[in-house]
Amino acid sequence: MFPTDGNKCPALLAVVATPNYLPYAKQVLAGAHRVGKWPGDYLLIAPGISAEDRVWFESRGILVREYTPLIDEAVWRNLPCAASWHRSALDRLNLFRQEYRRWSTVVYLDCDVMVTGPLHRLASATGLRAARDMAPYLKWQFRPEARYALTARGLNPLLPAFCSGVLVFSTALIRNETFADLVRGCLGDLPVACYADQAGLNVFFARRWRGLPSAYGRSGGTFPLLVHLAGGSLGKSLPPWAKGSPYRAEWERNVAAAEAIDFRIPVPLRHRDHWRARGAEWFCLPSRTELVERLRLFFLARYHEGRTRLTDHYRNRGWYAPLRAAYRRLTTRTTY
């Protein structure tokens, strides 16, 4: 099913789903096709997929891949992040394999993403692009006992961090050793990571990624093209399939439309789609909820950073050190 000629395909849109989450993957793919008008190919990475489900996807022009798990189930169950994350979250790392250099650009979407506008401009992205995470600093991607060990690794704990639920990257950054180094780093950080492989991805691409426009942000905003409803990451957002979600009706329409879509036939882009995407990237503002959360986290980070500096200062010198130094200067007589 993968292209075998020497020419690069334009772009690839990928989703990862276990057998229980295949309806959610269908919704994302259908939304990317009928609303996003994606101009490239589609890929489903599905560990443990049945033969019947594989036929359903492949008969509609969706590439299907299944990889050996990157970590043993017994080891995964003993990790702190296993309580909130499934082992299949690590399968998105397979997108950095050499075989995906057949495409010029790869776009990865989580299953809790709603496509609300054209996505064709993502197909020409360069480097690694991602949205800023709601835990916006690198140290907050790790458990408290490991946060200040980042300095010993040559990393600034206050480096900006991205969310791995929406990744856009050019395959030009994939080298022969990229996949092996990335997996090694992510597996090494898993015991102290808060969000599965996201900590390892942030360390691996530290200072090498760029942010996506707010139109592809986590909580939408004005004129969004893509909304990542990360299971209540802001404390108020609901996943699109939940009752009470404003995206529930659109989610059901996408699931129903997936049955009749042939993904090999792209939806033609209209002139207004180009202007809508360009305008959204320029003028889309974060939602009020996201702005409030960003401000709260900004001041919280400043508070914790200042408190840490004061604590380190007093621990090393004592709170009375300045008074003692002044007393010595006043009481020491200079002899001539």
Image: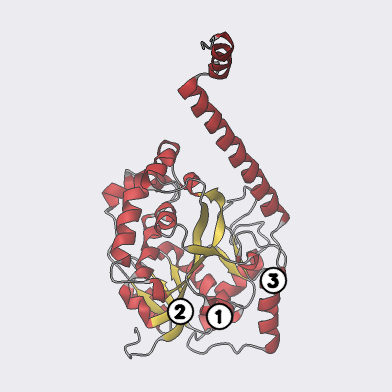
Mark in front: 3 vs 2 = 3
- Dot 1 falls on a residue whose secondary structure is helix
Q: CA distance from mark 1 to mark 2?
A: 9 Å
What's the amino acid at mark 1? His
Taking the spot 59% from the left edge, 67% from the top edge, the residue there is 114
On screen, residue 308 above or below 150 = above
Q: Nearer the viewer, residue 336 or 150?
A: 336
On screen, residue 209 above or below 142 = below
| Left or right of residue 228: residue 201 | left
What's the amino acid at mark 3? Trp
In the rendered image, the quadrant that contains the N terminus is: bottom left
- Dot 3 falls on a residue whose secondary structure is helix
- Dot 2 falls on a residue whose secondary structure is strand
Q: CA distance from mark 3 to mark 2?
A: 27 Å
Q: What residue is shown with label 1?
A: 33
Q: What residue is shown with label 2?
A: 42
Instruction: Return the x and y of residue 207 as percentages of the image width and height.
Output: 47, 59
Label 2 packing within 10 angstroms: few (<14), some (14-19), many (20+): many
Residue 136's label in the rendered image is: none
In this picture the colour scheme is secondary structure
What's the amino acid at mark 2? Tyr
Callout 1 touching callout 2 (CB < 8 Å): yes
Mark in front: 3 vs 1 = 3
Q: Nearer the viewer, residue 308 or 119?
A: 308
Label 1 packing within 10 angstroms: few (<14), some (14-19), many (20+): many
Taking the spot 50% from the left edge, 72% from the top edge, the residue there is 26
Among numbered discs 1 and 2, the one appearing first in the sequence: 1
Q: What residue is shown with label 3?
A: 282
Residue 56 in sight from this viewpoint:
no
